[in-house]
Amino acid sequence: MPGAKDHRVWVTQRLIREAFTGLLKQKPIQSISIKELCEVAGINRGTFYAHYRDIYDLREKIESDMYQDVLGELKPLLDSDAKATQREISTAVFQWMRENRDMCEVVLGEYGDRSFLWKMLDLGRMVCQESYQRMFEGASPRDISWFYAYASWGCIGLLRRWLWEQGFDIEEERLALAAGRWYAAIGAVYTGEARR
């Protein structure tokens, strides 16, 4: 009965992930022991080691899954034929974040893995580059790169507020629409479009 085994594995990994993210909101990864994680998850150490080498392997696998998940979510929007707007891309990202709130709180939180945040920002740059190029026709790749650096950190601040202060009380599309307006206004000023 392979389906039942797969479900048990999925449930076990979910329990481990939830315990890990809960602990990582409270303390840095180097302060989390396998023993403590297993107690919180309600599993034994043997079960943990059947899935992961150590706590860092767990984090790496969760982050890898997150990266692939975001990429999979965005893939239909990234096809060269799709010509996705910044709003559509932002809405998809915000919807994904709502569904994966636990990990987003950790990544953007005090004890998050900054190297993973940089990796996600690089993914965002790849995704947004073409969209920004369409938004600001005539802008140089250098201007687009500077704009992305500015916009991405603004977006992180927006996401942190949405996660912690607002508790997701704004719909993804509305947030994406507002962010798109802000980015268009800022981008127009930065690239000189506002002066024309």
Image (tube, rainbow, N blue to C red):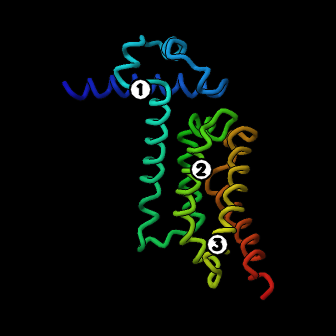
Q: Amino acid at mark 2?
A: Trp
Residue at the extreme bottom of the image, as rendered: 196
Q: Residue furthest right?
A: 195
Of pointers 3 and 2, the one earlier in the residue sequence = 2
What secondary structure is marked by label 2?
Answer: helix
Side of 147 where 43 appears, left or right: left
**What's the residue at 62%, 20% (across, down)?**
31
Q: Secondary structure at mark 1?
A: helix
Q: CA distance from mark 3 to mark 1?
A: 40 Å
On the image, the x and y values in percent for residue 89 come to: 55, 61
Residue at 73% in and 56% down = 154
Q: Tag 2 or tag 1, which sits nearer the N-term?
A: 1
Q: Which residue is mark 2?
A: 118
| Viewer-nearest residue: 59 or 171 | 59
Name the amino acid type tagged 1.
Gln
Nearer the observer: mark 1 or 2; the answer is 2
Q: Position of residue 15 (x, y in %)?
A: 46, 22
- Locate the C terminus by quadrant: bottom right
Secondary structure found at label 3: helix
Q: Is residue 48 left or right of residue 155?
A: left
Choose between 57 and 16: the one closer to the eye: 57
